[in-house]
Image (spheres, rainbow, N blue to C red):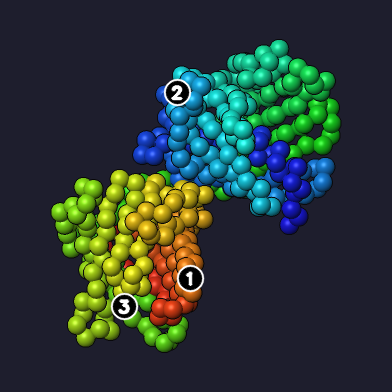
Amino acid sequence: MKAANAASVGAVLLLTVAIAGCDDDTRISSRQDPVQFPMGIGMYWVYEVYDSLTQATDTLEMSMVDTMRIEEDGSFAYVQRLFAGSGDASSMLYSLHDDTLIVYDVGYSGYSRWESFVFPLIPGNMWTGPFDSRYDTSRVVDRETVVTPAAVFGQTARVDRRCKHESSSDYAIFVTWLHPSAGIVKRRIQLHEGDKDVMMVTLIRFDLTTFPRTAFPDIPGTWWRYATYDSLTESTDTITITVKGKLPPLSRDIPITVWEIRSDAADSGIVDTLFVADETQGMLVSGDTLFSGELEDIFDFPQAVGRTWGLEFFAPVPDVVEKKPISVAAGDFETAFRNVTPTNNLNDYKISDTWLVPHVGIVKRHFKRIGLGPVTNLTWELIDFSGIAAP
C-alpha cells in the first residue's frame, strides 16, 4: 500500500467529518430524531483514502474521545481525533445547535468554524456554511444507496457543498454521503472545481459500541477464569478471579472492590487479592500477583481509541490504541479495546498489553518486565466467565 503525501493526508484530516459523543450520554439516532447521527465516546470509524493525483492510498481512523465547551458561546462540543496511517494526526470539534451541527477545525492557535450540516437532511434543503454566505452553500441533492467495504447503506443523504474564501478565485467541491446509523460513509473532495483530480474517502469498518464504566461487570459473585503461560519458566496455570464484595471508601470517598485470585497450581488455592478503586471515570487495580506485584493499572472510561490520560495515584495509565474484534478461548467478541501501558523507570522497564470487552471484562493480557525487579513475561487468556456478553 502506498502512503499518501503529507499535504494530501492533511487535507483529508481537515475536510473529512464525523460526529463525536459525550461520556455516558450515548445516543443512537431514531426515526423521530431530527439530527440523524450516532453519538458516544468510543465510537470508531476506519476509512480508506485515495488521492487520484498521486494515486496513493492511505487509511484514516476517526475516534470519539472526549467532550468540552466552546469558549465563544459556551456550547457543548464533542472531540474527534483523527489518525492517518502515514502518521499525520488532527482533531475536530462538533457542536450541536438545535438542528445545526457546526464542525470546528482545531489548530495550534485554537479552533475555527469549518463546516455545518442542517437537519433533517431532506432532498432540496439548502443552507449557507460558516464561510462568507455568498461563497459557501450546501444542498441535499438526493437519497442514494451507497456500497462500501463496511456495508451497503440505503437511503443515504447526499450533501453537495460548494465554497471558497472571498479572496480566492476558485471554488472547492465537497460531496458527502451521510447515513443515520453510521455517520459519514463516503466523501469526494475536489479542491479545485473543474479539476479531474479528486480525493475519495470510503468507510471500510466502523464500530459504534461504547464502553462506559458501568459496562465492566464487577458485582459480587462475578468471576473470570484464565489460562496463563509464563514463557520464562515454561509453566502454565489456571487462575480464577472472583469479585468478593465491597469495602468502605478509604479516601476521597472512593469505594473499593475486592477481587480474590485462586490458582489451580498453588497448594493454598488463594494466591492474592486485588483491590479495585472504583472512581467515576476509571478503575484502579493494585496489590496482586497476577498483575505482577507492585504494578498498578488504571483503566479509564469511557474507553476510546486515541484517548490518553496522565498519571493518577502515581500509576501508569493505559493508552487505548486499538478497537476491533478478538477471539479467545472463552469465545469470539465483536468489540474489544486494547490498552497498552509502557512504564520506563530507571533500570526498570515494564509494559502491559490488555484487551477489555464491554459486559465481559478483561479477556487477554500480556505483561513483560525487565530490570531490577523480577523478570516477567506472562500471558493470560480468558477461558470462561460468569456473565454473558451483551449483544
Of residue 274 and residue 145, the one placed in the foreground of this image is: 274
Of residue 244 and residue 296, the one placed in the foreground of this image is: 296
State which quarter of the image contains the N terminus.
Answer: bottom right
| Residue on which the image places disc 1 | 346
Dot 2 lies on which element? loop
Query: Residue 217 appears at what percent x and percent y?
Result: 28, 55
Label 1 or label 3, whichever comes before in sequence order: 3
Amino acid type of the residue that numbered disc 2 sits on in the rendered structure = Gly
In the displayed structure, would residue 384 be above or below residue 109?
Answer: below
Q: CA distance from mark 3 to mark 2?
A: 53 Å
Label 1 or label 2, whichever comes before in sequence order: 2
Query: Residue 94 appears at what percent x and percent y?
Result: 52, 30
Side of 69 where 143 appears, left or right: right
Q: CA distance from mark 1 to mark 2?
A: 44 Å
For residue 355, what is the image quadrant? Answer: bottom left
Residue at 37%, 83% in the rendered image = 236
Amino acid type of the residue that numbered disc 3 sits on in the rendered structure = Thr
Dot 3 lies on which element? strand
Residue at 44%, 50% in the rendered image = 309
Considering every residue shown, the one lying at the far front of the view is: 346
Side of 57 where 25 appears, left or right: left
As drawn, the label of residue 238 is 3
Query: Residue 87 appears at what percent x and percent y?
Result: 66, 52
| Residue on which the image places disc 2 | 74
Amino acid type of the residue that numbered disc 1 sits on in the rendered structure = Leu
Query: Residue 98 appears at what percent x and percent y?
Result: 46, 19
